[in-house]
Image (cartoon, rainbow, N blue to C red):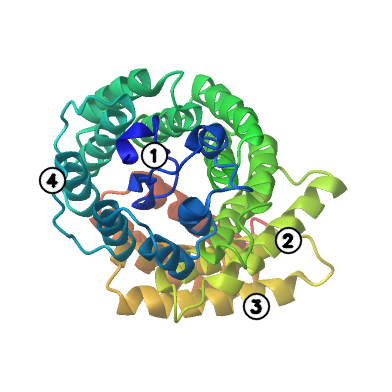
Amino acid sequence: MGWRQIFPQPVGLLPYPFNFVILPYVDGWADFIDNVLLLKLEELPQDWLFLKHLKEGNIEEAALSVSSSRDDELREYNIALLTGEYRNVEDDILNTLLRAALSSECEVVSTGREDIDALLLYRKAELLEGEGNVEDALSLLDRAIVSVKDISPLFEQVIVFKKAKIIIDNKGANYALVALLEDLYEKLEDTGADFLRADVAFTAGNAYSALGNLQQAVKYYGNALTFFTIERNPFMYGLVNNNMGLAYVSLPASSLEDQMRLAYGIQCFKNALKVFTKEKYPNEWASVTMNYANALQYLPTANPIKNLRRATELYGEVLEFRKSAGDEVGYARVLANMGNALAHLGELEEAEKHLMYALSIFSKYGMKEEVEGVRQILDEIQAVKGGTHG
């Protein structure tokens, strides 16, 4: 008896490339497969324990478990996925899956198995999206959804989520997509796919933020952080905190409660910078540091000068990074923000120098909105210097 007797296989459920792993045949497999298809992996046969290890991110334990498999061909296949090193296996379907998983050669074929067909469609859609071929990618995902509908419920939800993300990334968010994400978030509560549920929450937060519904954005970012902790996934912890911070500081600060949110936003940026250090994640560090400095300018405090001084120090650090990276537009954005902070400090001559330099770069690249913003600050400085303002 071989792996083909198990239908459907739990393909498509784990993060790439482990969404390609195949379970070997074991006696009594039907007693376990329903829970496996929902990634509820509390009780598994010995030969299936590698699936639990993979979900937990313990690749070494998974490799040990796979190496003890009695199915020689499937063992080589799964080890290839774990190591990322292609190995030729005799089974045609497994060879097709390996090529799809470990290269850009994904052949959409009919294998006689709807679960495997859906996996190939899903992978091909990912590759097409990477090439910018969005419409064909969406079309393949629609076919994949049909293939697994009522067969592998969690895999179906994975595909639906992928489709929603592609639409949001390429066509923008709308409330129909947000409703879809909220529905997915609720459905995933009954599964063991906590990492996927957190990703859905993060995407919903981004969508709400793009639509201007910042309170809902903050709610879903908070939901994402229940899984994306600094211990479990530091990069996503930093990313969610940065986006959550942006949502907080974008809320209107008219009341004491709203002013508290601004303080929460600054704390989010500090949390993100625990992960995004200049040495390890320089680009992310620069972006978050910029957001942190911007927020400090507007934080209500008894000593605003202290915050403005700190903001200019942070801008200075990012300015050096943008210059060394040759990022002219990024350099101009820092100059503009630093000029604004210097103007609030009353250092008008220095502020004008920074703003004029930023203006020249924005004009060079035809960035009309940025040019207008800088000119407004320069006009205010001239008004102050002329004594028309206090």
- The local crowd at label 2, few if under 14, some if 14 to 19, many if 20 or more residues have their Cα within 10 Å, is many
Type of the residue with mark 3: Arg
Residue 39 higher or lower than 144, as above or below: below
Residue 156 higher or lower than 249, as above or below: above
**Looking at the rendering, in which quadrant would you find the C terminus?**
bottom right
Residue 174 higher or lower than 385, as above or below: above
Residue at coordinates 75% horizontally, 69% vertically from top-left?
A: 304
1 or 3: tag closer to the N-terminus? 1
- The local crowd at label 4, few if under 14, some if 14 to 19, many if 20 or more residues have their Cα within 10 Å, is some
**Residue position marked by numbered label 4 in the rendering:** 105
- The local crowd at label 3, few if under 14, some if 14 to 19, many if 20 or more residues have their Cα within 10 Å, is some
Residue 23, given in percent of the width and then of the height, sits at 39, 45
4 or 1: tag closer to the N-terminus? 1
Type of the residue with mark 2: Leu
Labels 2 and 1 touching (C-beta < 8 A): no
Estimate the spatial distance between the alpha carbons at disc 4 and disc 1, rounded to whole Å. 18 Å
2 or 1: tag closer to the N-terminus? 1
User: Disc 2 vs disc 1: which is toward the camera?
Assistant: 1
3 or 2: tag closer to the N-terminus? 2
- Identify the secondary structure beneath mark 4: loop
**Looking at the rendering, in which quadrant would you find the N terminus?**
top left
- Identify the secondary structure beneath mark 3: helix
**Residue position marked by numbered label 1 in the rendering:** 12
Residue 139, given in percent of the width and then of the height, sits at 26, 22
